[in-house]
Image: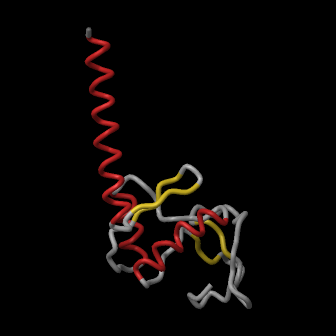
Amino acid sequence: LAGNRKENSIRQLEHRISRLEGVLHLRKMITTSGGKLFATNGKKADFLATLKTCQEAGGSIATPTSPSENDAILYFVKSYNTYAYLGIKESLIPSKFQFLDGTKLKYTNWHSKEPSGKGEE
């Protein structure tokens, strides 16, 4: 009997999560790619505020590691007609970028003549 209640509770929670995800997707606040959930609150902020908001939500600032993840981030850029911060930074070598923790990028999708370090990469 206890097992049935537990299974029923799990099904109810899964249903509620599914409904919430559906609403957020309709409002263009979440999308998924590669097993990752990408989300936005739709607000404009500077890099440090964005980084803090992501951490407070239990996540991290987006770091695309594949074309499909890059497209997930681009989904928000197009939906909100704005830019997006990424979890990368310029290294000590000009025009060379790395993840915030210092590890080397394995996927890039730079515009022509980029990266320049001028914010339009």
Q: Residue at x 69, y 66 (%)?
A: 105
The answer to whether residue 15 is above or below residue 34 is above
Question: Could you tell me how many numbered marks the image carries?
Answer: 0
Identify which residue, 65 or 19, lies in the foreground: 19
The location of residue 99, given as percent across then percent down, is 61, 65
The location of residue 61, given as percent across then percent down, is 47, 64
The answer to whether residue 54 is above or below residue 1 is below
The location of residue 93, given as percent across then percent down, is 72, 79
The location of residue 110, given as percent across then percent down, is 69, 80
Q: Residue at x 30, y 51 (%)?
A: 20
Looking at the rendered image, the quarter that the C terminus falls into is bottom right
Quadrant in which residue 80 is drawn: bottom left
The answer to whether residue 49 is above or below residue 25 is below
Q: Is residue 99 left or right of residue 39?
A: right
Quadrant in which residue 28 is drawn: bottom left
Residue most toward the top?
1
Q: Is residue 79 left or right of residue 10?
A: right
Q: How is the image coloured?
A: secondary structure
Looking at the rendered image, the quarter that the N terminus falls into is top left
Q: Residue at x 70, y 64 (%)?
A: 104
